[in-house]
Amino acid sequence: MPKMKTRKSVVKRFKRTAGGKFRRTAAGRRHLLSGKSRKRKRKLRRGGLVSPADYRRIAQALAMH
């Protein structure tokens, strides 16, 4: 059986935390920012954690099973 390759696009989007969860950046911070309020843009800086429903897919894409 060949080795599983890491999906490079996933590596760029997610980081592993010390507890084994995945950090992600918030969506909606790339363009069309002039129409969004200052408060909304400030809150989009934070990002968050990947939901448990998506955890397994991301772990597989990173070849960490």
Image (cartoon, helix red, strand yellow):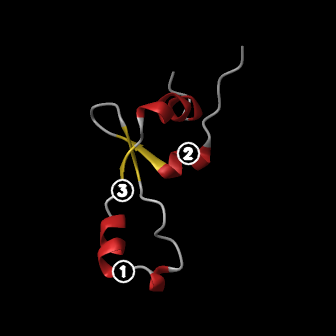
Single out the mark in the foreground, 1 or 3: 1
- Secondary structure type for disc 1: loop
Task: Give the Cα separation between the discs numbered 1 and 2.
Answer: 29 Å
Density class for disc 1 (Cα within 10 Å; few <14, some 14-19, many ≥20) is few
Quarter of the picture containing the N terminus is top right
Occupied quadrant, residue 15: top left
In the rendered structure, which amino acid carries the disc numbered 3?
Gly
Read off the residue under disc 2.
10
| Residue positioned 53% across, 76% down in the render | 31
Read off the residue under disc 3.
47
Whether 34 is drawn above or below 24: the answer is: below
- Residue 56 position in % (x across, y down): 51, 28
63 on left or right of 29: right
- Secondary structure type for disc 2: helix
29 on left or right of 6: left
| Residue positioned 65% across, 26% down in the render | 4
Going from N to C along the chain, the mark reached first, 2 or 3, is 2
| Residue positioned 45% across, 46% down in the render | 14
Read off the residue under disc 1.
37
Task: Give the Cα separation between the discs numbered 2 and 3.
Answer: 16 Å
In the rendered structure, which amino acid carries the disc numbered 2?
Val
